[in-house]
Image (cartoon, helix red, strand yellow):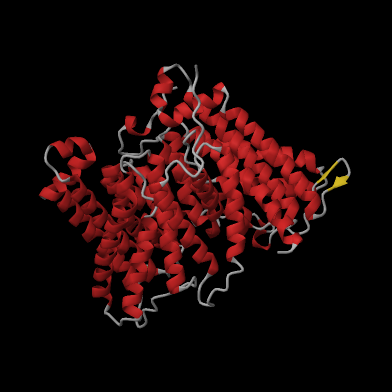
Amino acid sequence: MELALIVHLLVVITIYGILAISLNLVVGATGLFNLGHAAFYGIGAYTSALLVKAGVPWLLAVLASMAMAGFVAFVIGIPTLRLVGDYLAVVTMGLGEITRAVFKNWISLTRGPMGLPGIPHASILGIEFDTAEKFLILGVVCLVIVFVVAERILYSPFGRVLKGIREDEAAVQALGKNTYRFKMGILIVGSAMAGLAGSLFAHYITFIDPSSFVMWLTFFIFLIIVLGGLGNNLGAVVVTVVFVALREGLRFVGLPLWLNPAALQQLIFGILLIVATIFVPRGLIPERKVVYE
Amino acid sequence: MEIFVQLLVNGVIAGGTYALAAVGYSMVYGALKFINFAHGSIAMVGAYIAFVLVTIGNVPLVPAFLASMLLTASLGVMVERVAYRPLRRAPKLASLTTAIAVSFVLDATVMIVMGADIRTFSLTGLKSYQIGPIYITPVQGAIIVTSLVFMVGLYWLLTRTKLGKAIRAVADGISLAEVSGIDTNLIISAVFAIGSALAAASGALIGMDTNLQPTMGFIITVKAFAAVVLGGLGNVWGAVVGAFLIGIVENTGVWFIPPVWKDSIAYGILILVLFLRPSGIFGKKEEAQVTVL
């Protein structure tokens, strides 16, 4: 394989790794069924791309895109986080479609299905990340930061409450915790991280259109964290590496012409997810058990 | 004014197709307390079975329609056996995950077998009727009649037969039904069979009225869910009312806002209901609420 392709794959892995870790905080650790992760990713990408195109420095635009994704999560969380989990699932799924409808139909802002071309490369204080190699450094730095933050959250008292909510929300409430605020907090943090991933994506590829943020992406990330072990960030990263490589690898297998490669991928991953959920519910690298003396 | 009446009638027609999908959704929720995300995809498969029978098998329309309902019913039973039953005692996240995976598997399979293109039944030689200022196609007439017949039939089944009594008992409390000597596995299979057959009817009628696409299931899932939430989760008749309301609001809404947003209206209603009255029009309040603030 060519070196350029490997570098490209590594960049994709850093972006997907951030998505996997952030979804893992929300779904794996807290048990909130968020199906709109691609929407937060897309909101981050569009916010950042539009701001930088308007002349805002990238570093500020990233913060803005994280804030924007977090804000949307907050608005979505108000009606749904007080209710049983199923509502959150459908509302976030709906959010995914609504944001895509906005990207597609608010043509004066987003250029609709034509997409936004010519997004400037990311740059910090004059250093431009204009090649894949340079961008890889930026991606790895972001991934490491997100990983460390996520680990800190998981093994803090805050994270302990989150896992408690996942196991038995009523019991946590009985201990006097306001579970609504904990759920809201982690949904905002997770979505802001997805916004960061979106910004990275936009300034790496330098072109975005609504088709990059479909539900299928959320599903793909979902599969990664289920296989990696819900609640385990290391597992999420390891499986991201395997899956991105596998997905790209599938492109080079000679398929008969009538076989739609996207559909085949969807079929294989769908079956994998069913099998994994039934037979290896704790994933390949199960969540670390914390014992308090 | 005449256009408004026409839009209203269109709304009732759309509502009829949503109602057929929504009752199955609601019955499954009633029995297992989980959202069957694959329900729309099952409706899509039903539409394609009818399509294949009519266009390739040259089966007349009505027998093809009934055969598709029967075949889809067995598909629904099979899906429950393979993907949901092993997880009935697992955390809810697990069965929600497999439900999404099932919908992706079904969509991908149809995409591989039938292609991703839009298909139409091409029912030639059918003329629209004119009733006063309103135009209505025979298919749309059939939608109104079929949905009414099936609703009445379902009402009879649920309230006047032993099977219906058992289904209601399972919905009230599965363990209590089990100790009363009801074979709950059998009843749950029956619920999936009935729900899937009605979903197939919904899908096939939508397919005849408009067109078929392997991705059409997703929209059906969302519309049906919005209807179910509006009516009150688990309340079958509430779901019917909700379905017609959504169909009508959606179609008359085109009067006020651009048609590209038509599919977003259902989400709008959904989020509004969750804000104002999460238990829906007919639901009991405590069922939706988990957090007391």
| Residue at screen point 51% across, 47% down | A222
Whether residue B255 is visible here, answered yes or no, is no
Q: Position of residue A291 (x, y in %)?
A: 49, 23
Whether residue B262 is visible here, answered yes or no, is yes
Quadrant (top left/top right/bottom left/bottom right) for the N terminus of chain B: bottom left
Q: Position of residue A202 (x, y in %)?
A: 71, 52
- Residue in the foreground of this view, choosing between A280 and A248: A280
- Residue in the foreground of this view, choosing between A124 and B70: A124
| Residue at screen point 62% across, 61% down | A248
For residue B178, side relative to residue A105 (left or right):
left
Quadrant (top left/top right/bottom left/bottom right) for the C terminus of chain B: top left
Q: Position of residue B182 (x, y in %)?
A: 14, 43
- Residue in the foreground of this view, choosing between A211 and A135: A135
Question: As displayed, is residue B240 above or below residue A142?
Answer: below
For residue A212, side relative to residue B41 (left or right):
right
For residue A117, side relative to residue B83 (left or right):
right
Question: As displayed, is residue B278 above or below residue B58?
Answer: above
Q: Position of residue B17 (x, y in %)?
A: 34, 59
Residue B105 sits in quarter: bottom left
Residue A196 sits in quarter: top right
Question: As displayed, is residue A199 above or below residue A174?
Answer: below
| Residue at screen point 42% across, 75% down | B120
| Residue at screen point 24% across, 57% down | B193
Q: How many marks?
A: 0
Question: As displayed, is residue B213 above or below residue A126?
Answer: below
